[in-house]
Image (cartoon, helix red, strand yellow):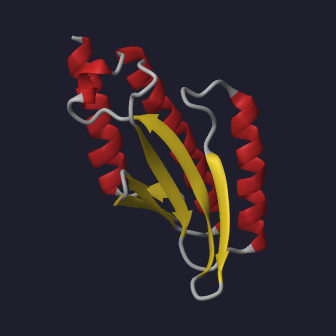
């Protein structure tokens, strides 16, 4: 990959009030993901921001090399597939926290909302529209 290749960000944020148990689970997950395996651009970053008006914003940011044109032709297949695995691992853990702690997450990519996780499950737009479509494109390229 070129050093100047642009980076997009996948952001998963807890919706509503953040219980202490959720914050603790997310802190533990942040440490686990950092030590579990090598991610393409590093482990997801945990952010915890407080604002007097809006309250607390807690979530993860995962950096991904952009696959938008014209950069899509420069993303190596193995890197793209590794990014997909990074995203699936993060979203799988977010589903676990959502189910165990009964919280919802909103998920955004490239500054736009792309779906949600609620009661431990990804909605259709995440599972089919984002992950499923990404897998389909990679599978087609591999043929």
Query: Which residue is at a point 75% across and 31% down the rendered structure image?
Result: 35
The one nearer the camera, 101 or 105, is 105
x and y, in percent, of residue 26 in the image: 70, 56
Query: Which residue is at a point 50% across and 40% down the rendered structure image?
Result: 63
State which quarter of the image contains the N terminus.
Answer: top left
* In the image, residue 59 above or below residue 20: above
Quarter holding residue 5: top left
As drawn, is 44 to the left or to the right of 69? right
x and y, in percent, of residue 2 in the image: 41, 19
Query: Which residue is at a point 24% across and 21% down the rendered structure image?
Result: 73
Extreme-front residue of the structure: 4
Extreme-top residue of the structure: 143
**How many dots with numbers?**
0
The one nearer the camera, 41 or 91, is 41
Quarter holding residue 112: bottom left
* In the image, residue 57 above or below residue 90: below
Query: Which residue is at a point 59% across and 28% down the rendered structure image?
Result: 39
State which quarter of the image contains the C terminus.
Answer: top left
x and y, in percent, of residue 100 in the image: 66, 61
* In the image, residue 96 above or below residue 49: above
As drawn, is 6 to the left or to the right of 23? left
x and y, in percent, of residue 67 in the image: 30, 32
């Amino acid at each position: 990959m070129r050093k100047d290749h642009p980076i997009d960000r996948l952001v998963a944020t807890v919706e509503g009030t953040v219980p202490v148990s959720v914050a603790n689970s997310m802190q533990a997950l942040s440490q686990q993901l950092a030590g579990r395996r090598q991610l393409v651009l590093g482990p997801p970053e945990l952010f915890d921001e407080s604002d007097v008006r809006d309250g607390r914003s807690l979530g993860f940011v995962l950096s991904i090399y952009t696959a938008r044109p014209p950069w899509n032709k420069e993303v190596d297949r193995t890197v793209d597939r590794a990014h997909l695995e990074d995203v699936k691992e993060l979203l799988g853990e977010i589903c676990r926290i959502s189910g165990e702690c009964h919280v919802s997450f909103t998920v955004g990519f490239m500054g736009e909302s792309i779906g949600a996780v609620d009661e431990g499950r990804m909605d259709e737009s995440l599972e089919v529209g984002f992950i499923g479509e990404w897998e389909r494109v990679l599978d087609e390229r591999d043929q």
